[in-house]
Image (cartoon, rainbow, N blue to C red):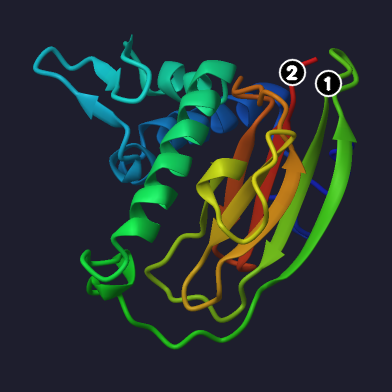
């Protein structure tokens, strides 16, 4: 991968951090991502039992770490069960459209949207493992001071903008007051190792970087 324009390296600021420091930073960022309450608590199909173990209510599987559960969500079994659940909910929603309260009726956090952020997407490949992937570079010059951009991977069956297609998944990126932005990517298994998939938010330049590598 090309690290010539590595984030954190600015003119007049000295040298770039070594590989060990960079990998350690990425590992810590990934750990925080996996432990983030946003993804786990927002997922309606996972609960933490009295022993602290994560249980997938959709597939009846148990997971001892957030990383294990996130890996499970990209597996064939979870995707298939998710597809069946979504189709069942669509049928139920259609039959009871006038009798149930939709999610649009629930209170929402309000803010004035100012459009979508500028972005650039590049293809990358690990020189050692030859794993292919993508990097996302987004700019949020007018983002709120107390907001840090975040992203999540969304299954094709979780969205209703396009017809469901198991060959694709989506990267959804959020940063208020900008509109959420989504990218359609291949539904390959994501390599969650610390030096493969990571994110970085540069508060000084208001730039957000994401790298996602797929397992071979």
Left or right of 191, for residue 142 = left
Q: Nearer the viewer, residue 25 or 96?
A: 96
Residue furthest left as drawn: 50
Q: Secondary structure at mark 2?
A: loop
Q: In which quadrant is the C terminus drawn?
A: top right
**Residue 97, image x and y in percent?**
32, 66
- Residue under the point 55% across and 74% down: 179
Q: Is residue 181 above or below residue 55?
A: below
Disc 1 is placed on an element classified as loop
Q: Earlier in the sequence, mark 1 or mark 2?
A: 1
The answer to whether any part of residue 100 appears in the image is yes
- How far across and how far down the image is residue 82, in percent? 47, 32
Q: Residue lying at the far front in this picture: please name it.
A: 95
Question: Which residue: 51% across, 59% down?
Answer: 149
State the residue at coordinates (61%, 72%).
140
Question: Which quadrant of the view contains residue 16?
Answer: top right
> Dot 2: within a 10 Å radius of its alpha carbon, few (fewer than 14), some, or many (20 or more) residues?
some
Q: Which quadrant of the view contains residue 199?
A: top right
Residue 9 in view here: no
* Residue 12 in the image: above or below residue 134: below
Name the residue tied to disc 2. Answer: 215
Are the two marked residues, 1 and 2, in contact with CB atoms closer than 8 angstroms? yes
Image coordinates of residue 39 in percent, x first then y, are 39, 41
Q: Which residue is mark 1?
A: 131
Residue 109 to residue 47: above or below: below
In the figure, is residue 50 to the left or right of 209? left
In percent of width and height, residue 90 lies at 43, 51
- The front one of 49 and 138 is 49
Is the residue marked by circle 1 packed among few (<14), some (14-19), or many (20+) residues within 10 Å? Answer: some
> Which disc is residue 5 wearing?
none
* Left or right placement of residue 65 versus residue 134 in this view: left
Residue at mark 1 to residue at mark 2: CA–CA distance: 6 Å
């Amino acid at each position: 991968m090309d690290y010539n324009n590595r984030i954190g390296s600015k003119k007049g600021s000295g040298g770039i951090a070594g590989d060990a420091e960079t990998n350690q930073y990425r590992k810590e960022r990934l750990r925080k991502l996996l432990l983030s309450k946003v993804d786990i608590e927002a997922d309606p199909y996972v609960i933490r039992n009295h022993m602290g173990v994560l249980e997938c209510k959709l597939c009846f599987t148990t997971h001892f770490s957030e990383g294990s559960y996130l890996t499970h969500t990209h597996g064939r079994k979870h995707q298939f069960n998710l597809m069946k659940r979504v189709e069942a909910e669509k049928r139920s929603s259609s039959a009871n459209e006038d009798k149930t309260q939709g999610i649009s009726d629930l209170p929402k956090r309000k803010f004035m949207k100012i459009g979508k952020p500028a972005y650039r997407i590049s293809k990358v490949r690990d020189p050692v493992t030859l794993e292919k992937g993508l990097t996302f570079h987004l700019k949020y010059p007018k983002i709120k001071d107390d907001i840090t951009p975040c992203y999540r991977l969304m299954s094709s069956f979780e969205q209703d903008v396009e017809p469901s297609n198991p060959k694709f998944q989506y990267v959804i990126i959020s940063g208020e007051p900008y509109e959420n932005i989504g990218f359609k990517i291949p539904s390959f298994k994501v390599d969650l190792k610390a030096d493969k998939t990571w994110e970085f938010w540069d508060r000084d330049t208001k730039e957000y970087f994401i790298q996602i590598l797929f397992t071979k």
